[in-house]
Image: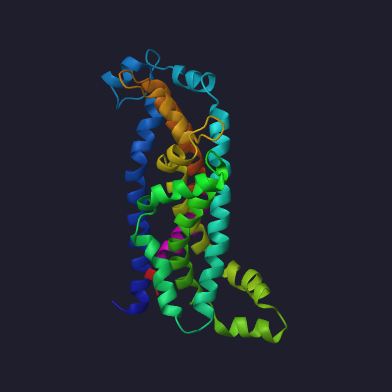
Amino acid sequence: MSKARSVPFRTAAIHVALIAYTLIALFPVFLTLVNSLKNRNAIFRSPMSLPGPSSFSLIGYETVLSQGDFLGYFGNSLIVTVVSIAFVLLFGAMAAFALSEYRFRGNTLLGLYLALGIMIPIRLGTIAILQGMAASGLVNTRTALVLVYTAQGLPLAIFILSEFMRTVSDDLKNAGRIDGLSEYAIFFRLVLPLIRPAMATVAVFTMIPIWNDLWFPLILAPGEATKTITLGAQMFIGQFVTNWNAVLAALSLAILPVLVLYVIFSRQLIRGITAGAVK
């Protein structure tokens, strides 16, 4: 098989693999949504079955919306996630542009240093982070979470975006310089539009761990006014008794934004993942 014919075949194989992986990954989501619409007895007696006339119940959603400030938790998660993603994409793209565009002494070492964040979990520094936030007066604030999540997402963003930015034509950027464009204009008007698939990929992979995180909200922002949706769902989990209807309902509502984001960016996400595999 010639190289020209193998590229479409490889692309099709990657798309099939991604679809299969998506279906497998979505099965637990489907199971959570289905069981959130059933009464407690049906959840334990037939967890794999669809809700019927005798098992259908919205008691979980009623409990979630009536107890605690669930809408406030949802708003906190939304604000923290959106602001963190915006900072990760902006600062990550700027750092990646500098590393890929300008050659200077220590360029490679700086790139390796920034990539260390991918290999070293940020949670290892939880005590130091908590001490720093307490000294800065940022405990129980959304700002603390935004700062931590931005630092957490930057290494992967820089690593991915720098590889994509190296594929942007130098002739295009030089033509912009000849036309009098500043480096900022070249970055925002020429480079960023060409790496939208990579930006969408980074946004999705950054959002999921932020939205689902329980560790840092529990450590840095456990107050009622700053709780995230994942932390708020823990109020229905007790030491001896767990309200599974409310837990499943809260998790179902928490899943929806991730699914919406995936549907919106699915095409750009697949293009970003497969771009380096079909050259």
Magenta stretch prevailing secondary structure: helix
Residue 194 x/y as whole percent = 57, 70
Residue 275 appears in the figure: no
Quarter occupied by residue 89: bottom right
Residue 166 x/y as whole percent = 48, 77
* 89, 253: nearer the viewer: 89
Which colour scheme appears in the figure? rainbow
Asked if the stretch drawn in magenta spans residue 214, the answer is no
Quarter of the image for the C terminus: give it.
bottom left
Quarter of the image for the N terminus: give it.
bottom left
Asked if the stretch drawn in magenta spans residue 267, the answer is yes
Magenta residues, start to end: 264-274
Q: Is residue 225 above or below residue 109?
A: above
- Give me the residue at 58% from left, 55% from top: 86
Q: Is residue 170 left or right of residue 9?
A: right
Residue lying farthest to the right in this orientation: 180
